[in-house]
Image (spheres, rainbow, N blue to C red):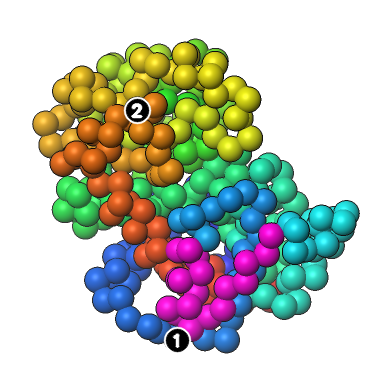
Amino acid sequence: MNPKDFLSMADLSAAEITDILAIAKRLKARRVPSRALLGKSLGMIFQKPSTRTAVSFAVAMYEMGGLALTLSEQQLQLKRGETLADTARTLSRYLAGIMIRAHRHEDVEILARYADVPVINGLTDKEHPCQVLADLLTVMEAFRVKSPADLKKFHIAYVGDGNNMAQSWMLGAAILGLHFTAACPRGYEPDKDFQIQALRLSKRSGARVAVVEDPREAVAGAHVVYTDVWTSMGQEEEAEKRRDIFRKFQVNESLMEMAHPKAIVLHCLPAHREEEITASVLEGPQSVVFQQAENRLHVQKAVLQKFLGGRSKSS
């Protein structure tokens, strides 16, 4: 893989996803300090709060011999009106790469346009690609398969808001040729442009990607049941309304009875117990959510090694 930006799942080919996950698997199996990124620094810009993204990227850089700098908007001159373009051009002269967790996907695109070093999407309102890579590794481990290509025989169901997680998963499934169904209330489906892009990619890979309104239809026979919060950051004023609309989309024991007997449950966390998922399911034997959270670290290492291990974009 040539050094470039990682803003979307669509920035990766099936072969590149497979490569990253193979590296992550090896690094997880032998978690020892390395010198892979010795002398390199990652700037981490946070417009939103973070637990898993912040800690996994920082620890990943440390364990590979590099340095991670946490940069909030309050620390940067962005707070005083400096443009993202000027910030990108300045940071490129100090850093080997930039990871940003942003409110708007457009901010990440602007940063990447002006930066001379790779930019990694740590989360936006449109996508969360690093999370999907960790999810894929978790599913591979749960079903003991060696490659993402082996996941084609499994059905992945996403239940809830058609948000950034659903959109990145749609693209990832379409690229890899997987069977993926998202169940979302009417008006809360993934954006049409993501559905169109997933359909186009599916025609090349043979994927089956669908969006339905009935969560029971999506979960019927599914090997993976995935959910996320009903109210994402920045939507807090809609919380009460969303609880009413999404009530029948809760992942509970009744819904899980529709899934494959050996199905696993995924949640990207943080979770709101008794809203999008019941405590009994989240803490139950089918849940692998904390293994999933751990895999953020191993995947971040692989992503950083791939994107920061080479030269700058302008080299």
Local SS, label 2 = loop
At x 30% / y 22%, what residue is drawn? 218
267 horizontally vs 240: left or right? left
Up-down relation of residue 39 to residue 219 (above or below): below
Q: What is the x, y in percent for residue 197? A: 53, 33
Q: Do the residues labelled 2 and 1 touch (CB within 8 Å)?
A: no
Q: What residue type is labelled 2?
A: Glu
Occupied quadrant, residue 238? top right
Name the residue beneath numbered marker 2.
274
Name the residue beneath numbered marker 1.
35
At x 35% / y 28%, what residue is drawn? 274
* Closer to the camera in the image, 188 or 79: 79
208 horizontally vs 129: left or right? left
Looking at this view, name the residue that lies furthest to the left: 261
The image quadrant where one finds the C terminus is bottom right
Q: Residue 305 carries which label?
A: none
Q: Can residue 136 be seen in this view?
A: no
Q: Does the magenta stretch include residue 58?
A: yes
